[in-house]
Amino acid sequence: QVQLVESGGGLVQAGGSLRLSCAASGLRFSRYAMGWFRQAPGKEREFVAAISWRSGTTTYADSVKGRFTISRDNAKNMVSLKMETLKPDDTAVYYCAADWMGQAGTSRSQYDYWGQGTQVTVSS
């Protein structure tokens, strides 16, 4: 049974930082591209960042480029999202997702498995 479990969310002031983690189990982690998406109230789930399975190529949404960093640790079956210079617009539930042999795609439909999400709230 595949499980993706996010952690690290919370309440932070604008300009602050958070680090999200996603622990994966039940899948051959090293063969999956991993992505982060987010969904704010009343909005569709949107792409944030992704990292490919083989080369570690990364992709970022324009809105987070230069502020967020995605990384993976295949030995620990974990993917992380370091978020800096947070803004109130970053407030959302953040989801981790896995894409079999993916290339760090930005489309939700490319991803096979999803976590339950972790809430990030940025106060102004």
Image: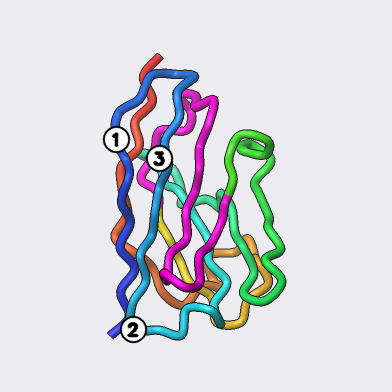
Residue type indicated by callout 3:
Ala
**Secondary structure under the numbered disc 3 in the rendered image:** loop
- Residue bounds of the magenta highlight: 70-94
Q: Which residue is mark 2?
A: 26
Q: Earlier in the sequence, mark 2 or mark 1?
A: 1
The residue that appears at 49% across and 19% down in the rendered structure is: 15
**Secondary structure under the numbered disc 2 in the rendered image:** loop
Crowding at dot 3, Cα within 10 Å, few <14 / some 14-19 / many 20+, comes out as some
C-alpha span from label 2 to label 3: 29 Å
Q: Which residue is mark 3?
A: 40
Q: Which residue is mark 1?
A: 10
From this view, report whether residue 81 is shown above or below residue 77: above
Check whether the beta carbons of the residues at disc 1 and disc 3 lie within 8 A of each other. no
Q: Position of residue 17 (x, y in %)?
A: 45, 30
Residue type indicated by callout 1:
Gly
Crowding at dot 1, Cα within 10 Å, few <14 / some 14-19 / many 20+, comes out as some
The residue that appears at 54% across and 77% down in the rendered structure is: 32
Residue that sits furthest to the front in the current view: 75
| Marks 1, 3: nearer the viewer | 1
Q: Position of residue 98 (x, y in %)?
A: 48, 72
Q: On the rendered image, what quadrant is the C terminus found in?
A: top left
| Marks 2, 3: nearer the viewer | 2
C-alpha span from label 2 to label 1: 27 Å
